Amino acid sequence: MHKDPARVFAWPVRVYYEDTDFGGVVYYANYLRYFERARTEWLRSLGVDQQRLAAEDGLQFVVRRAEIDFLRGARLDDALSITVEVMERKHTYLRLRQCALRVEEPMAEAMVQAACVRRDTFKPAPLPAALAARLAG
């Protein structure tokens, strides 16, 4: 899995006891939480303040689709790297590839479609101009 580090954002996550199931591995739904946190931090790193975006522009991001492959079980105290990589940018949504990696070994991989919508109607809205410009550059 060779990636261009300039194009792939990574956020560190430690597996805590509360993240695991009876078998001592990360409960599958928690990968969604990890992916959400990484997307939030990725947006923050690009200068997108989601609270301000909602309050001032009336916009928010929603997950429209997620396809996830659970490959291996991460365990208590594992240090994971949760990645975000833009695979496709459209006018109103982004298609993102996300991985949960233990060192270089993938634990889970997902394709996520994150759509920009108007908060009051939940109808599609153009990506914020500043974000679109950052992704284009």
Image (cartoon, rainbow, N blue to C red):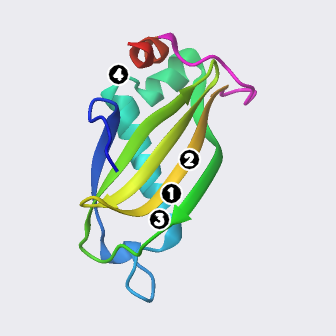
Which residues make up the magenta segment? Answer: 118-129
* Callout 4 amino acid: Gly
- Whether residues under marks 1 and 2 lie with C-beta atoms below 8 angstroms apart, the answer is no
The residue that disc 1 covers is 32
The residue that disc 2 covers is 111
Q: Would you say 54 lies left or right of 75 here?
A: right
- At mark 3, the secondary structure is helix
Does residue 72 lie above or below 116 as drawn? below
Give the mark nearest the N terminus, 4 or 3. 3
- At mark 1, the secondary structure is helix
The residue that disc 4 covers is 47
Report how far apart the C-alphas of labels 2 and 4 lie in the structure: 23 Å
Q: Position of residue 98 (x, y in %)?
A: 45, 48
Q: Would you say 24 lies left or right of 50 here?
A: left
Give the mark nearest the N terminus, 1 or 2. 1
Does residue 99 lie above or below 73 as drawn? above
* Callout 3 amino acid: Asn
Which residue: 52% across, 52% down? 110
Disc number for residue 30: 3
- Whether residues under marks 1 and 4 lie with C-beta atoms below 8 angstroms apart, the answer is no
Does residue 8 lie above or below 53 as drawn? below
As drawn, which residue projects farthest toward the front? 2
- Nearer to us of marks 2 and 4 is 2
* Callout 2 amino acid: Met
Q: Is residue 125 magenta?
A: yes
- Nearer to us of marks 2 and 3 is 2
Please identify the dominant SS of the magenta region: loop
- Whether residues under marks 4 and 3 lie with C-beta atoms below 8 angstroms apart, the answer is no
Q: Position of residue 84 (x, y in %)?
A: 41, 41
* Callout 1 amino acid: Leu
Q: Is residue 33 magenta?
A: no
